[in-house]
Image (tube, grey):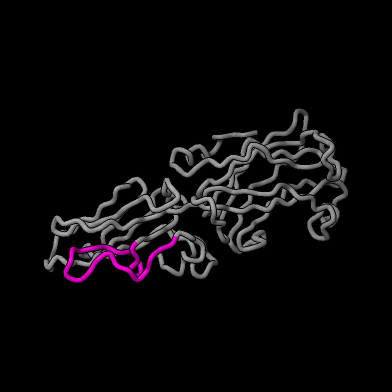
Amino acid sequence: MSYTRSSISAIFAVALVYGASNVASGQVSGINGPDGSTSAAMWFLGHGIASCCTGLAPNLYFAQTTAVLTNNSGDPTPTIVWSTDTPDSLQITPGSGALSATLTALAPSTHTSSDINVWATVDGVQTANLPIYINTPYSVSNGGAVNQASSPTVSCVARGYSVGYTTIVTNTITDRTGVIALTKIDLNETLEHQIDAPGGNWPFPTAGAWPVSSVAWTTNTNYIDYLAICATGTEGYSPALANYNTSTTTLGFSETQKFWIGSTSAYTGECAQINDTQLNTSYPVQTQQTTPGSTPTQQAACAVNTTILN
């Protein structure tokens, strides 16, 4: 898929210069990004993910863009070679006649500004560089669990239970620059190392997914996660549940929660947050909230049964 100016401008604040050109008639050959831009940007959402997301019109997150060569060499059939200084992060696939190339993100930029360059040589003469920035979902932040005991729709009582608690955690995803809150994007969670307190028998939650169409996206940049356990009082849970209060610190169970951004399939996308999630008998807590980082080595630390926090 091709990156377009309209598709990324709404969500990416690094300025791209349009209309200007890296080449002028009669001078050395040059390359430009989409719409004649002198720089280009794309997203890395995990290996094999070309774009996101189904349900957005148009898709706002693209892992590919196009570079175009203007041949000013005077040779109608020149020898053209495309190159980059960061082959581990960017794949170049020349098009027909090598007058254009598809650029595919293999890993995100390591800095918060354009740090990848692409150029071409035409009959041995090198063009100016085309700077590239590869953004990525980088971190997830939240303001803590908020009690929903008075909610007419999601409280335990509203759902037919007599004891327990429901809380909502509102999350925001931030990009590699650290300043841009991502708009709606597919994501999923994985839940690992789920363990009851010694002698306990609480049920474990199942992992969820948040497509862009989910009502859990309560605003264009915020999605909610429920930390809740409710009971009728006849289940025989041990330790016994209580209604929401923060004075009781008895542990019910714990798990390691990981958020993966860019996909609704488990363990795909970019791992942007790892939480130690604990449900106590009367309220939940999340501690040791960790941003793993975007390098391949850091992302590998999010693999199943690695970086267990609880």
Q: Where residue 238 appears, x then y in whole percent?
A: 82, 34
- The N terminus sits in image quarter: bottom left
Dividing the picture into quadrants, the one containing residue 118 is bottom left
Q: What's the residue at 47%, 66% (across, down)?
A: 9
Span shown in magenta: 15-38
Q: Residue furthest top?
A: 198
Tag count: 0
Q: Is residue 195 left or right of residue 52?
A: right
Q: Quadrant of the C terminus?
A: top right
In this rendering, would 126 be left or right of 136?
Answer: left
* Image spot of residue 93 (x, y percent): 29, 57
Q: Is residue 89 above or below residue 99?
A: above
The answer to whether 89 is drawn above or below residue 53 in the figure is above
In-front residue for pair 257/236 = 257
Residue 72 position within the rendered picture, expressed as x and y whole percent measured from the top left? 17, 67
- Magenta-colored stretch includes residue 232: no
Q: Position of residue 299 (x, y in %)?
A: 48, 41
In screen coordinates, is 104 left or right of 215?
left
Outermost residue to the left? 75
Q: Chief secondary structure of the magenta span?
A: loop
Residue plotted at (53% across, 50% down):
178
Query: Would residue 36 be counted in the magenta stretch?
Result: yes
At 31% across and 58% down in the image, what residue appears?
130
Left or right, 276 with reference to 233:
left
- Give residue 224's quadrant in the image: bottom right
Q: Quadrant of residue 92?
A: bottom left
Q: Residue at x 19, y 66 (%)?
A: 71
